[in-house]
Amino acid sequence: MSERGIQVSIAQARAGAVIGARPLGIETVRSALAEVMDPELPMVSIVDLGMIGEIVVDRVTGAIEVELLPTFVGCPALAMIETAVASRLAELGPPVRVETTFRIPWTTDRITPSGLAALATAGIAAPAEPDAVHCPWCGSGRVVLDSSFGPTQCRSLHYCRDCRQPFEAMKPV
Protein backbone atom coordinates (compact mmCIF):
# COMPACT_ATOMS: atom_id res chain seq x y z
CA MET A 1 0.00 0.00 0.00
CA SER A 2 1.27 3.47 -0.88
CA GLU A 3 1.89 6.25 1.65
CA ARG A 4 -1.18 8.04 0.29
CA GLY A 5 -3.27 4.90 0.74
CA ILE A 6 -2.14 4.62 4.34
CA GLN A 7 -3.02 8.27 4.97
CA VAL A 8 -6.46 7.82 3.41
CA SER A 9 -7.05 4.70 5.51
CA ILE A 10 -6.06 6.55 8.69
CA ALA A 11 -8.35 9.47 7.81
CA GLN A 12 -11.23 7.08 7.13
CA ALA A 13 -10.64 5.24 10.39
CA ARG A 14 -10.63 8.52 12.31
CA ALA A 15 -13.91 9.47 10.61
CA GLY A 16 -15.42 6.10 11.47
CA ALA A 17 -15.62 4.99 7.85
CA VAL A 18 -13.33 1.96 8.02
CA ILE A 19 -13.95 -0.36 5.08
CA GLY A 20 -16.15 -3.18 6.26
CA ALA A 21 -17.18 -1.35 9.42
CA ARG A 22 -20.84 -0.62 9.89
CA PRO A 23 -22.04 2.74 11.18
CA LEU A 24 -23.64 2.78 14.59
CA GLY A 25 -27.35 2.18 14.70
CA ILE A 26 -29.82 4.78 15.89
CA GLU A 27 -30.72 2.58 18.87
CA THR A 28 -27.07 2.57 19.97
CA VAL A 29 -27.07 6.37 19.82
CA ARG A 30 -30.40 6.56 21.68
CA SER A 31 -29.08 4.21 24.39
CA ALA A 32 -26.04 6.44 24.86
CA LEU A 33 -28.30 9.49 25.07
CA ALA A 34 -30.40 7.73 27.72
CA GLU A 35 -27.34 8.00 29.97
CA VAL A 36 -27.38 11.81 29.75
CA MET A 37 -29.32 13.14 32.71
CA ASP A 38 -31.01 16.52 32.82
CA PRO A 39 -28.87 18.80 35.03
CA GLU A 40 -31.94 20.39 36.65
CA LEU A 41 -33.79 17.09 37.03
CA PRO A 42 -30.93 14.61 37.58
CA MET A 43 -33.28 11.72 38.24
CA VAL A 44 -34.45 11.63 34.61
CA SER A 45 -32.62 11.35 31.30
CA ILE A 46 -33.06 13.74 28.41
CA VAL A 47 -34.49 10.81 26.43
CA ASP A 48 -37.16 10.19 29.08
CA LEU A 49 -37.92 13.93 29.16
CA GLY A 50 -38.55 13.73 25.41
CA MET A 51 -35.83 16.23 24.56
CA ILE A 52 -34.43 14.22 21.64
CA GLY A 53 -35.81 14.91 18.19
CA GLU A 54 -34.39 13.34 15.07
CA ILE A 55 -31.25 11.19 15.19
CA VAL A 56 -29.34 10.69 11.93
CA VAL A 57 -26.33 8.42 11.45
CA ASP A 58 -24.52 8.93 8.13
CA ARG A 59 -24.16 5.58 6.36
CA VAL A 60 -20.80 6.46 4.84
CA THR A 61 -18.92 8.37 7.54
CA GLY A 62 -20.86 7.21 10.60
CA ALA A 63 -21.24 10.86 11.65
CA ILE A 64 -24.02 11.39 14.18
CA GLU A 65 -26.49 14.28 14.09
CA VAL A 66 -28.91 14.82 16.96
CA GLU A 67 -31.74 17.32 17.33
CA LEU A 68 -32.15 18.62 20.87
CA LEU A 69 -35.56 20.01 21.81
CA PRO A 70 -35.32 22.52 24.67
CA THR A 71 -38.08 22.34 27.25
CA PHE A 72 -38.33 26.13 27.45
CA VAL A 73 -36.94 29.06 25.48
CA GLY A 74 -34.03 30.43 27.46
CA CYS A 75 -33.51 27.24 29.49
CA PRO A 76 -30.38 28.00 31.55
CA ALA A 77 -29.26 24.36 31.44
CA LEU A 78 -29.34 24.10 27.64
CA ALA A 79 -25.61 24.71 27.09
CA MET A 80 -24.81 22.08 29.73
CA ILE A 81 -27.13 19.58 28.06
CA GLU A 82 -25.63 20.24 24.61
CA THR A 83 -22.13 19.70 26.01
CA ALA A 84 -23.16 16.52 27.82
CA VAL A 85 -24.78 15.12 24.65
CA ALA A 86 -21.74 15.95 22.49
CA SER A 87 -19.35 14.47 25.09
CA ARG A 88 -21.31 11.25 25.53
CA LEU A 89 -21.72 10.67 21.79
CA ALA A 90 -18.06 11.53 21.12
CA GLU A 91 -17.21 8.43 23.16
CA LEU A 92 -18.82 6.36 20.38
CA GLY A 93 -16.12 7.49 17.93
CA PRO A 94 -17.71 9.17 14.90
CA PRO A 95 -18.01 12.95 14.49
CA VAL A 96 -20.99 14.43 16.33
CA ARG A 97 -23.20 17.43 15.64
CA VAL A 98 -25.84 18.55 18.14
CA GLU A 99 -28.44 21.00 16.88
CA THR A 100 -30.84 22.77 19.19
CA THR A 101 -34.11 23.35 17.40
CA PHE A 102 -37.59 24.68 17.99
CA ARG A 103 -38.76 23.15 14.67
CA ILE A 104 -40.44 20.44 16.72
CA PRO A 105 -41.80 22.03 19.89
CA TRP A 106 -41.18 20.17 23.11
CA THR A 107 -44.29 19.45 25.13
CA THR A 108 -44.82 17.60 28.39
CA ASP A 109 -46.63 14.91 26.36
CA ARG A 110 -43.15 13.82 25.22
CA ILE A 111 -42.17 12.70 28.74
CA THR A 112 -42.09 8.89 28.80
CA PRO A 113 -43.90 6.81 31.43
CA SER A 114 -40.53 5.96 33.02
CA GLY A 115 -39.68 9.66 33.03
CA LEU A 116 -42.94 10.44 34.82
CA ALA A 117 -42.24 7.65 37.32
CA ALA A 118 -38.72 8.98 38.00
CA LEU A 119 -40.13 12.47 38.57
CA ALA A 120 -42.79 11.15 40.95
CA THR A 121 -40.19 9.20 42.92
CA ALA A 122 -38.35 12.50 43.43
CA GLY A 123 -41.55 14.22 44.57
CA ILE A 124 -42.34 16.04 41.33
CA ALA A 125 -45.92 15.73 40.12
CA ALA A 126 -46.78 14.93 36.53
CA PRO A 127 -47.73 17.82 34.27
CA ALA A 128 -51.38 18.76 34.68
CA GLU A 129 -53.57 21.81 34.63
CA PRO A 130 -53.48 23.57 38.04
CA ASP A 131 -56.86 22.16 39.14
CA ALA A 132 -55.84 18.59 38.19
CA VAL A 133 -52.44 18.31 39.94
CA HIS A 134 -52.08 15.35 42.31
CA CYS A 135 -49.62 15.03 45.17
CA PRO A 136 -46.73 12.75 44.19
CA TRP A 137 -46.36 11.65 47.82
CA CYS A 138 -49.90 10.53 48.69
CA GLY A 139 -51.84 10.84 45.42
CA SER A 140 -54.35 13.34 46.81
CA GLY A 141 -55.99 15.86 44.53
CA ARG A 142 -56.50 18.23 47.46
CA VAL A 143 -53.56 20.44 46.59
CA VAL A 144 -53.05 24.18 46.34
CA LEU A 145 -50.78 26.10 44.05
CA ASP A 146 -48.27 27.83 46.27
CA SER A 147 -46.37 29.58 43.47
CA SER A 148 -46.42 29.43 39.69
CA PHE A 149 -42.69 30.00 39.83
CA GLY A 150 -40.66 27.00 40.94
CA PRO A 151 -36.92 26.43 40.99
CA THR A 152 -36.89 26.24 37.19
CA GLN A 153 -39.08 27.61 34.39
CA CYS A 154 -40.72 24.23 33.88
CA ARG A 155 -41.92 23.68 37.47
CA SER A 156 -44.36 25.23 39.93
CA LEU A 157 -44.69 24.84 43.71
CA HIS A 158 -47.68 23.17 45.39
CA TYR A 159 -48.83 22.10 48.83
CA CYS A 160 -50.86 18.98 49.67
CA ARG A 161 -53.69 19.52 52.16
CA ASP A 162 -53.87 15.83 53.04
CA CYS A 163 -50.26 14.78 53.70
CA ARG A 164 -49.16 18.39 54.27
CA GLN A 165 -46.11 18.04 52.07
CA PRO A 166 -44.87 20.73 49.73
CA PHE A 167 -43.97 19.50 46.26
CA GLU A 168 -43.12 20.61 42.76
CA ALA A 169 -45.14 19.91 39.64
CA MET A 170 -44.08 20.01 36.01
CA LYS A 171 -45.92 22.77 34.19
CA PRO A 172 -47.99 21.47 31.28
CA VAL A 173 -46.78 22.76 27.94
Image: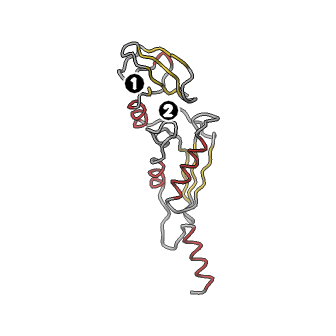
As drawn, 53 above or below 2: above
Q: Position of residue 17 (x, y in %)?
A: 54, 69
In the picture, measured across the screen, residue 171 lies left or right of residue 143, that is right
Distance from disc 1 to disc 2, alpha carbons, whole Å, reads 18 Å
As drawn, 25 above or below 122: below
Q: Residue at x 55, y 48 (%)?
A: 54
Q: Residue at x 52, y 40 (%)?
A: 39
Task: Pick the quarter of the image with the C terminus.
Answer: top right
Q: Count residues near mark 1 (Cα–Cα under 10 Å), then give few for <14, some for 14-19, many for 20+.
A: many
Disc 1 vs disc 2: which is toward the camera?
Answer: 1
Residue 109: assigned label: 2
Q: Position of residue 80 (x, y in %)?
A: 57, 44
Q: Position of residue 154 (x, y in %)?
A: 55, 29
Task: Give whichever of discs 1 and 2 has the lower sequence position.
Answer: 2
Q: In the structure shown, which secondary structural element does the residue marked by tag 2 occupy? A: helix
The residue carrying mark 1 is 136
Q: Residue at x 50, y 21 (%)?
A: 157
Q: Nearer the viewer, residue 107 or 149?
A: 149
